C-alpha cells in the first residue's frame, strides 16, 4: 500500500466511527492490522517473493483454468516470517484475543522449534484442517489464532502478486468461484450498477472478478429454489446471500442502493457489516472457506 493509499485508508477508518454497529475498538483493531500488513508489503516490494509472469504465460494459465499464482513458488523467508509472527502476536495480545497462556505458549513453541511457521502457512493455504487441528492440540493454542497468523503472514505477498498480475490480461472468461490470481475463495461480493453484474472479492489477495448472479459462489448450485437473501434494513445496500444447498453465505453490497456520493470499498463495507456475519451464523450458515471472516469474527467476539 502506498503512502497516499494509507492516508485514504485512515480517512475511511475514521469515517467508520460513525457506524452504530461497530465499536471504536473494532475500528482500531482493523486499522492496526492494515498498518501492520502495509508495513510488510513495503518491505517486500524490493524482494522477489513470487515469480514474474508474461502476459502470454498468464493467458495460457487462464485458458487451462488455473489461477496465476503458483503457491509452491512463493518465497517465505525465515526472517520475514519471524518478524511478522512477532508483530501479529503483539497485535493479538493488544486486543486480548489470547486465552490464558496462549501467547506465552506460542512464543515458546516457536523458540523451541515446535512451531514451523513456513509449514503452518503452507498447510493452511492448502486447507489442511487436520494439520491445524493437531498443531492446536499439541501447542494448546486455538486453531483460530494459528489460522489468523497463517493467513496474515502470507497476505502481504499475495496482495503484491495481485498488484503485479492483475493488469497482465483481462479475466473476462473467468467465471469460476475462486480467485483467478491466487485461487482463494471470495469473502464478500457486490452487485454493480451496470446491469447488476456480480463481482466477487478474494479473501486473500483482494482481487475482484466477475461471477454469475445465478450460481452459489461456493458450491456452484444454480437451482434458484436454494438461493435466498436477507437484510436487516430494507433500504440498506447490504444483504446476505445464502445457499440452502451448501449452507454457506456471502455478504453482498448492492451498488444500486449505495449512496451516490460514496465510493464502494468492499473491505470497509465488510468491517462495517460484521453484524450481518453474526446474523448469518445465528441462522445456521457458515463460510468455512473464508478463514479471514471466520477468524476475525472469533477475534471480534472476544473484543465485545
Ligand atoms: Zn486472490
Ligand atoms: Zn451453495
Image (cartoon, rainbow, N blue to C red):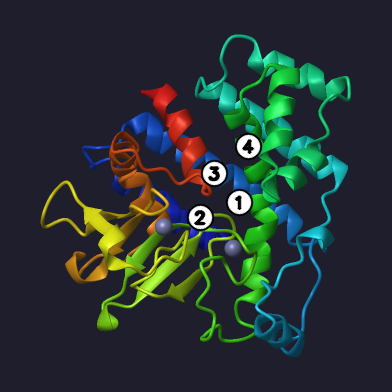
Residue 231, above or below 78: below
Neighbour tally class for label 1: few under 14, some 14-19, many 20 plus, Cα within 10 Å = some
Q: Is residue 292 left or right of residue 109?
A: left
Numbered disc in front, either 2 or 4: 4
From the Cβ of disc 1, is ligand 1 less than 8 Å away?
no
Across and down, in percent, residue 258 comes to 21, 65
**SS type, badge 1:** helix
Q: Is residue 40 left or right of residue 116?
A: left
Residue 286, above or below 199: above
Q: Give me the C-alpha separation between circle 3 and circle 4.
A: 7 Å
Q: Is residue 298 left or right of residue 17?
A: right
Badge 2 is on which residue? 6
Badge 4 is on which residue? 147
Across and down, in percent, residue 288 comes to 50, 44
Q: Give me the C-alpha separation between circle 2 and circle 4.
A: 25 Å
Q: Give me the C-alpha separation between circle 3 and circle 1.
A: 20 Å
Badge 3 is on which residue? 291
Amino acid at each position: 500500500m502506498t503512502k497516499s493509499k494509507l492516508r485514504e485508508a485512515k480517512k475511511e477508518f475514521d469515517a467508520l466511527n460513525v457506524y452504530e454497529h461497530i465499536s471504536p475498538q473494532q475500528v482500531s483493531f482493523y486499522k492496526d492490522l492494515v498498518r501492520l500488513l502495509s508495513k510488510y508489503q513495503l518491505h517486500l516490494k524490493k524482494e522477489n517473493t513470487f515469480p514474474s509472469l508474461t502476459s502470454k504465460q498468464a493467458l495460457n494459465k487462464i485458458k487451462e483454468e488455473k489461477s496465476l499464482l503458483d503457491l509452491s513458488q512463493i518465497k517465505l523467508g525465515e526472517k520475514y516470517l519471524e518478524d511478522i509472527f512477532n508483530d501479529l502476536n503483539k497485535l493479538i495480545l493488544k486486543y486480548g484475543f489470547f486465552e490464558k497462556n496462549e501467547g506465552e505458549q506460542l512464543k515458546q513453541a516457536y523458540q523451541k522449534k515446535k512451531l514451523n511457521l513456513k509449514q503452518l502457512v503452507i498447510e493452511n493455504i492448502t486447507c489442511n484442517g487436520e494439520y491445524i487441528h493437531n498443531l492446536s492440540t499439541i501447542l494448546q493454542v486455538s486453531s483460530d489464532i494459528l489460522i489468523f497468523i497463517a493467513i496474515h503472514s502470507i497476505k502481504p505477498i499475495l496482495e503484491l502478486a495481485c498488484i503485479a498480475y492483475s493488469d497482465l490480461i483481462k479475466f473476462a472468461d473467468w467465471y469460476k468461484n475462486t480467485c483467478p490470481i491466487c485461487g482463494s475463495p471470495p469473502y464478500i461480493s457486490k452487485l454493480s450498477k451496470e446491469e447488476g453484474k456480480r463481482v466477487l472479492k478474494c479473501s486473500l489477495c483482494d482481487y475482484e472478478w466477475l461471477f454469475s448472479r445465478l450460481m452459489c459462489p461456493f458450491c456452484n448450485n444454480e437451482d434458484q429454489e436454494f438461493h435466498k437473501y436477507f437484510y436487516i434494513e430494507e433500504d440498506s445496500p447490504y444483504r446476505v446471500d445464502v445457499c440452502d444447498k451448501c449452507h454457506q453465505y456471502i455478504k453482498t453490497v448492492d451498488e444500486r442502493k449505495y449512496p451516490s456520493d460514496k465510493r464502494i470499498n468492499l473491505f470497509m463495507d465488510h468491517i462495517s457489516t460484521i453484524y450481518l456475519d453474526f446474523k448469518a451464523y445465528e441462522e445456521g450458515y457458515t463460510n468455512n472457506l473464508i478463514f479471514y471472516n471466520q477468524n476475525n469474527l472469533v477475534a471480534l467476539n472476544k473484543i465485545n
